Amino acid sequence: NVVVILERTPLTEDLVDDIMSPATDYSIEMKNDIYTSLRLFPKVSAGALKSTVIHPATEKHINKYKQHAVFCVRETASDYNNITLPYITSSSFSLQWLYNLLAKKAEVDRIVYEDDDQVNGFMLVPDLKWDCKQTSNLYLCAVIHRRDIKSIRDLRGEHVQLLENIRDKGKQAIREKYQFNVHKLRIYFHYQPSYYHLHVHFANVSYNSPSCTLGKAHAIDDVIDNLKMDSDYYSKCSLTYILKENDPLLEKFKEAGRCFD
């Protein structure tokens, strides 16, 4: 089995003049006062397609990328310990690809920055969703070296130094590498994450990714502040997130008596 993900890359400014030239065919879909909606058929290529291939793909990969109905889940601390954590322990994806990256056995040419400290260090690499061609959709991930933190649920007050190190050195590296204004960065965690090894997302705040929405993203500064107020905050709080109807974790919640009808 194989999963192929096709995405349009953002339009670059140099294509706009060609696309909006008189040679472009068009049809009017709607016109109302000052607003007009057009369908354009440019004679030139309107940008490349980016493809990500997962092969061989497991059933988990295939289910992850299929379209399904979604549900909001409110996970209490008890839910995490009794439902989510056992599921993670028994069912998470293989992390061998990640360990290859951290050991520099793969993707070495993609490393933007590394702090090799094994307690508070991390590796910064472009996310696969970013083609590195322009900063309008800039997207990188910082992956920690240590292997004992699966997600924000495992974070405690003692990890504040780790998080501040990632935030500060990650911003500095992006500023120097891409001459990017770091005040335009959105820096956050996902919960639930796509893989259970703590990592931090760095994205252009103007890049409208579905993964930045309510029920998915947690700003790193908010996480740091919560841990400073209460060292055990993430072991005690309730968290809301979204799961697809075919997600095995949602099935675990149903088996525990939760109703999503």
Image (tube, helix red, strand yellow):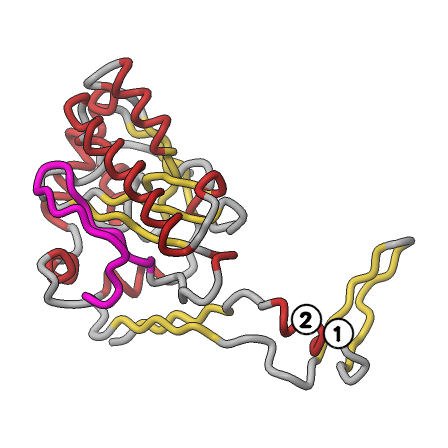
Residue plotted at (15% across, 29% down): 81
Is residue 260 visible from the viewing direction of this image?
no
* Image quarter hosting the C terminus: top left
Mark on residue 54?
none
Identify the residue shown where x is 40% and y is 64%: 132
In what element is the residue under mark 2? helix
Q: Nearer the viewer, residue 257 or 116?
A: 116
Q: Which residue is mark 2?
A: 16
Q: Nearer the viewer, residue 180 or 163?
A: 180
Magenta-tinted stretch: 108-127
Q: Does 22 sit above or below residue 221?
A: below
> Is residue 28 found inside the magenta-colored segment of the image?
no
Task: Give percent across and percent down for residue 136.
Answer: 52, 56
Quadrant location of the N terminus in the rendered image:
bottom left
Residue under pointer 1 = 20
Is 216 or 199 nearer to us in this picture?
Answer: 199
Q: Is residue 109 magenta?
A: yes
At horizontal 30% and vertical 44% (from top left) the residue drawn is 170
Count of picture labels:
2
* Element class at badge 1: loop
* Residue 104 located left or right of residue 246: left
Measured from the top left, where is residue 133 in percent x and y? 45, 67
Q: Which residue lies at the image location 82% right of the left edge and 70% below the top edge? A: 28
Check disc 1 and give the amino acid type: Met
